[in-house]
Image (cartoon, grey):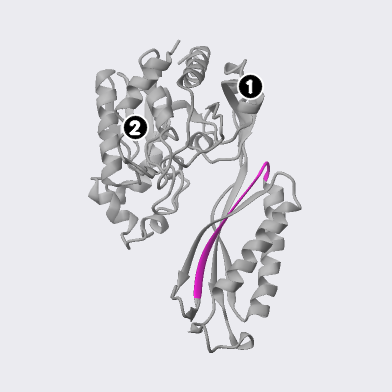
Amino acid sequence: MIAAGELRDRLAGLEPIGLDAQGTTRLAWSEELAAAEAWFLDQARAGGLTVERDPAGSLWAVPAGDGPWWATGSHLDSVRRGGRFDGALGVAAGFALAARANVAVIAFADEEGARFNTPTFGSRALCGRLDTEAVLARVDEHGIALADAMRTVGVDPESLAAAPTWLPRLRGFLELHIDQTRDLERAGAPAGAVRALAARTRLAVTVQGRADHAGTTPPDERRDALGAAARLIVAAESLAGDQPGLRVTASRLLVEPNSFTTVPAHVRLWLDARAPGPEPLAAWRATLEAGAARLAVATRTEIAVATASHSAGVTFAAQVRAALGGLPELVCFAGHDAGILAERMPAGMVLVRNPTGVSHAPEEDVDLDDAATGASALLAALERLGA
């Protein structure tokens, strides 16, 4: 069994990194993440594990021998001003598991995608699901290209395409993660096994209008990009309301020239949509695009809708779910590295009760006794799976 005190001790060295009064910020390829990776190295050395970095920048702490191994872990990066358990809990628990079983611990690179809009970067690279040339050219808010950011921490972007060569080193993957809903709280359960991850799509929308004087331009002469974007957001959310289980969020908005006295000329908008299966997402998008075409005519703007990312969802392997027997099952609407790996190997997830359901925010919290219950369930599953 794994005790809450051990998880608390392992997390103690990680929690202060990137923490301030507004929350935890450890963006990919940053100084804060490098400090978290130093914690990872210390944990591995204390457990007699060897640390290696794969071509995507993910850290592996591996036991003696050539493998393949069952692996566990999660990620060390965070969103901006996030919580202290998302990702970190799974990595800390991974080292507790590795102290008791012959498993590898992985901290996947850039799971959150908060800096370059590259969610589950490390696991997608490992599974050969990255358009490497396109993602390396992406830039952050400061104009720094992803390829250059990788170089600053000693990761060669030219080797990114070789990441799938590491996949045969794994027999399967298990991940412990904080529940990002109140589902387990409502069920009165300290932990639960994930049956499936929901289908997800992220749309990148551009609206092109024309800059003009905010005071002197009459309504019938305006080409207001922000006004059109606002109407599109309302339409996207309204359409979701007609389909049970569909969740839509206008997650990011960039406006140019962003001036008090100027009609907005250009908007970049990201829409996040999730549903239990891919069919509701496809229907929602088709209706939204038809509405966007009509809106463009009505507002005298140009509106383009493109796919930023998409996942049809995944059901975790029956053998892994059986090994986690005894825990209640649920569907998770968040994306996780385990879900990416599940398309290529046996994989599974255990979520830990989160009383408020708050995540990606400083108020994120779990009881470490609940976390220990989840970690112990993973340990028992690994034993049943022959790790």
- Please say if 60 is above or below 369: below
**Does 205 sit left or right of 62 as displayed?**
right
Q: Residue at x 48, y 35 (%)?
A: 364
Which residue matches tag 1?
188
Q: Residue at x 57, y 17 (%)?
A: 323
* Quadrant of the rendering where the C terminus is positioned: top left
What label does residue 15 carry, if any?
2
Name of the residue lying farthest toward the top = 1
Is label 1 in a helix, a strand or a loop? Answer: loop
Q: Residue at x 68, y 79 (%)?
A: 298
Taking depth in this image into account, of 74 and 237 the one nearest to the observer is 237
Name of the residue lying farthest toward the right = 242
> Identity of the amino acid at label 2?
Glu
* Quadrant of the rendering where the N terminus is positioned: top left
Residue 4 at x, y = what percent?
42, 16
> Identity of the amino acid at label 1?
Gly
